Amino acid sequence: MNRLECKKCGFKSYAFDNFMDLSVHIPRKAIRMTGMISLRECLESFITPERMEECGYKCKKCKAVDNFEKELTVYRFPKILVVHLKRFYNSAMRREKLNTTVEIPLTYDFSHLAPNSSKICLKYT
């Protein structure tokens, strides 16, 4: 689910998009500190609300420009989920590959990310 909220008037817009995979970036804090991050931290950064500034989007209610908060959440998981970790990031000068280690547990419960979905667990065999 994609939620967009105008910070000036409080108007909220919702959109539901179908998906079969999640493209999740590796947070920058892992690069600076330990060089290691958990899958949980990557997924939580995916659903963390972000400020939209200088995007050109205009509020449908008050017509304010560039004063929004965008939040992506998972309403319901597909039967088979692919998590794609974005291992590249674009800096001001160039594109770089991240060498950060992502800790992926043998079992992982995704239910905290999508309360409306049936329980989904990651299991390696």
Image (tube, grey):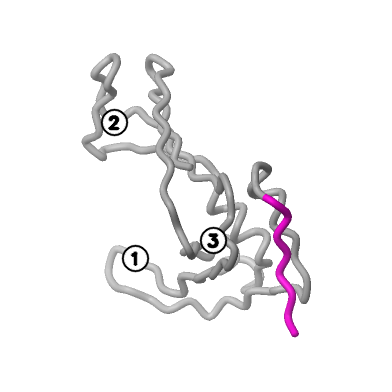
Name which residue lies at 53% across and 53% down: 46
Residue type (three-letter) at the residue carrying disc 1: Ser
SS at badge 2: loop
> Which numbered disc flags the more N-terminal residue, 2 or 3?
3
Segment colored magenta: 118-125
Instruction: Give the labeled residue for mark 2.
Output: 66
Tell me if label 2 and label 3 are in contact, CB under 8 Å.
no
Residue located beneath label 1 in the image? 91
Camera-side residue: 93 or 46? 46
- The chief SS type of the magenta part is loop
- Magenta-span inclusion, residue 71: no
- On screen, residue 59 above or below 24: above
In the depicted view, which residue is nearer to us: 32 or 37?
37
Q: Position of residue 47 (x, y in %)?
A: 55, 48
Whole-Å distance between the Cαs marked 2 and 3? 24 Å
Q: Is residue 85 left or right of residue 8?
A: right
Q: Is residue 24 rendered to the left or right of residue 123?
A: left
**Mark nearer the viewer, 1 or 2:** 2
Alpha carbons under labels 1 and 2: distance apart:
23 Å
Image check: 104 left or right of 84? right
Give above or below for 124 relative to 85: below
Most distant residue in the right direction: 107
Q: Which residue is mark 3?
A: 27
Label 2 crowd bin: few (<14), some (14–19), many (20+), radius 10 Å: some
